[in-house]
């Protein structure tokens, strides 16, 4: 088992819950802390952002970032949960991690998440779609 | 001076699929570049949620014709990561063998196209001619020249016939000789160096900032390679090195890919030798995948392919995220294309190795009076090569 304890103790109560397994640390943080956590992982720890995954669950809309620490093969995955499914909003990490620009645009159009502070909040994949589709990955979309 | 806008695409021979670039030019110099995508979006992630885990592998195999092993390999890694599933030793060598053969044919494909774009058609003919035996090896191993259907959760679908290993090694020796010849010819060609050195530079800082991967990052001095960073399959059992160069230009990207091809040949030979002696099963019988989440990745020819699956204990994923390497490499154009001549934009856009379709199309430039006139980027690129060739005589 790899050792995430230093990072966990450093983040303290910013980590609301965690699930640690071999070379993987999934942990939940509040929206108010995501920029600080992302900045620490990218700038201080030297992680690379692989991508991010947005998922609709019973709790709400989840956004899970996947930061890879390449020198050790470990992943740090901070998770944000937005319980307001009708108007999910969270802070954008693009101002501190430039590589997040495209994936945040994609999550925004696919699941309707508003990324506050994103420098270019416009659709990435559906902008040219002939049917003007909205939030295609939301479960309720077929019911209107 | 007034700035003009040059649209490239959505259909153009340098683009793998439909993408639309707009180059802002000041005279001959590119001052900014933007990109629109979305025409090729097929909803794989959504479709995968309605497929079983095994069906999902066939689906992701068809995301890309070139990386048709990298996606299913990353997907099985993600599914195996949920329960830390072990796979048999023989299957580890077979997975590695197929993955490296894919790298050889992909790098040769790119090398040929890069030569074609700058008017070096001999390189194109050579590279594609000597790529053919690699596809024949795939046919011997899997029965298919493309979309091999080899990956399964817990192992591989098909074994390598022990009687075929000697002939596979013979083909590998022949490929190695031919690629050595190509590498020597390319290295001795002064026009090629003049045409590619210092062109489309991506600095190390920009590569890190854009989270670039694969040869695009390694040519800029960023030593990132999943095969060493988190070795899966047989990568911790074979000897190879990671190729890293410092200049970040198109020439370095070419060098990285060429040298990586030799490393891949080395890995393939080791795997084939091991398959002579390593016996046992090729697949563990995985009955179910429990509820949880898993991350899987593989070093595709273009860089890290990333898959994430979330499961609920049923026989299908509730979420399947896919991120191909081009998704993070393409945005580096913002850094590498600024300040270069229009004639160099073609090869710089191609240097991150997006896939290609064979539709050639001229482009339109709108001047300040919004009057269009025709200009062919490929013609421009070749004219520059000819100009350099004349200067060197």
Image (cartoon, rainbow, N blue to C red):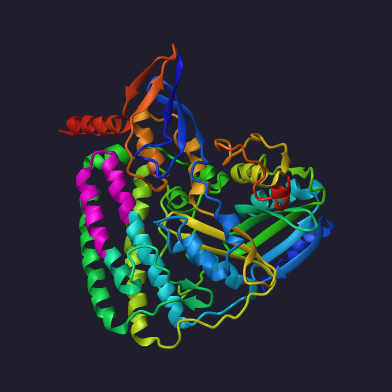
Query: What residue span does the magenta drawing correspond to?
Result: B108-133
User: Where A84 falls versus B300 (above or below)?
Assistant: above
Residue B336 in the magenta stretch? The answer is: no
**Residue B338 in sight:** no
Residue B135: quadrant of the picture: bottom left
Which x, y percent locates residue A25? 70, 64
Which x, y percent locates residue B28? 37, 23
User: Nearest the camera: B369 or B144?
Assistant: B144
Residue B6: quadrant of the picture: top left
Residue B129 in the magenta stretch? The answer is: yes
Quarter of the picture containing the N terminus of chain A is: bottom right
Residue B365 placement, left or right of B225: left
| Residue pictured at 45% horizontal, 82% vertical | B282
**Residue B174 in sight:** yes
Residue farthest along the right direction in this orientation: A13
Our reading of the magenta stretch's main secondary structure is helix
User: Nearest the camera: B183 or B110?
Assistant: B110
Which x, y percent locates residue B268? 34, 71
Residue B295 placement, left or right of B298: right
Which x, y percent locates residue B388? 23, 32
């Amino acid at each position: 088992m790899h050792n995430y304890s230093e990072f966990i103790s450093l983040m303290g109560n910013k980590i609301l819950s965690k699930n640690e397994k071999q070379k993987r640390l999934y942990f939940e943080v509040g929206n108010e802390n995501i920029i600080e956590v992302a900045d620490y992982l990218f700038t201080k720890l030297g992680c690379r952002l692989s991508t991010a995954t947005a998922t609709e669950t019973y709790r709400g809309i989840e956004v899970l970032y996947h930061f890879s620490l390449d020198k050790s093969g470990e992943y740090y995955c901070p998770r944000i949960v937005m319980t307001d499914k009708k108007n999910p909003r969270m802070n954008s990490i693009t101002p501190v991690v430039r590589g997040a620009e495209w994936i945040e645009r994609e999550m925004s159009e696919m699941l309707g998440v508003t990324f506050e502070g994103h420098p270019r909040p416009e659709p990435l994949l559906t902008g040219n779609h002939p049917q003007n589709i909205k939030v295609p990955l939301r479960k309720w979309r077929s019911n209107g | 001076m007034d700035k003009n806008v040059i649209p490239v695409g959505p259909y153009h021979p340098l683009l793998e699929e439909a993408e639309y670039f707009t180059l802002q030019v000041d005279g001959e110099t590119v001052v900014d570049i933007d990109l629109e995508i979305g025409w090729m979006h097929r909803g794989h992630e959504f479709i995968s949620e309605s497929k079983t885990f095994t069906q999902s592998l066939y689906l992701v195999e068809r995301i890309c014709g070139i990386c048709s092993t990298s996606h299913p390999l990353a997907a099985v890694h993600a599914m195996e990561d949920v329960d830390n599933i072990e796979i048999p030793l023989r299957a580890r060598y077979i997975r590695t063998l197929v993955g490296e053969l894919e790298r050889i044919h992909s790098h040769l494909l790119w090398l040929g196209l890069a030569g074609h774009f700058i008017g070096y058609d001999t390189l194109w003919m050579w590279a594609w001619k000597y790529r053919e035996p690699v596809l024949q090896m795939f046919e011997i191993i899997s029965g298919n020249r493309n979309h091999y259907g080899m990956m399964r959760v817990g192992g591989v679908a098909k074994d390598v016939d022990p009687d075929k290993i000697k002939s596979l090694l013979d083909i590998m020796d022949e490929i190695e000789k031919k690629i050595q010849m190509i590498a020597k010819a390319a290295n001795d060609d002064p026009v090629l160096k003049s045409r590619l050195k210092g062109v489309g530079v991506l600095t190390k800082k920009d590569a890190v900032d854009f989270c670039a991967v694969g040869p695009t990052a390694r040519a800029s001095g960023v030593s990132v390679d999943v095969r060493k960073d988190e070795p899966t399959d047989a990568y911790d059992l074979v000897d190879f090195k990671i190729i890293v160069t410092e200049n970040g230009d198109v020439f370095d990207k070419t060098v990285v890919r060429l040298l990586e091809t030799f490393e891949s040949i080395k890995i393939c030979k080791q795997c084939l030798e091991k398959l002579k002696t390593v016996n046992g099963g090729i697949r563990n019988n995985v009955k179910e995948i429990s509820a949880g989440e898993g991350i899987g990745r593989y070093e595709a020819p273009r860089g890290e392919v990333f898959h994430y699956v979330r499961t609920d204990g049923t026989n299908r994923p509730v979420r399947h995220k896919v991120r191909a390497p081009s998704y993070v490499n393409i945005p580096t154009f913002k850094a590498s294309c600024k300040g270069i001549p229009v004639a160099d934009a073609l090869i710089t856009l191609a240097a991150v190795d997006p896939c290609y379709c064979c539709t050639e199309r001229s482009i339109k430039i709108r001047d300040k009076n919004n009057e269009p006139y025709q200009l062919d980027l490929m013609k421009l690129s070749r004219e520059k090569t000819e100009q350099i060739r004349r200067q060197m005589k």
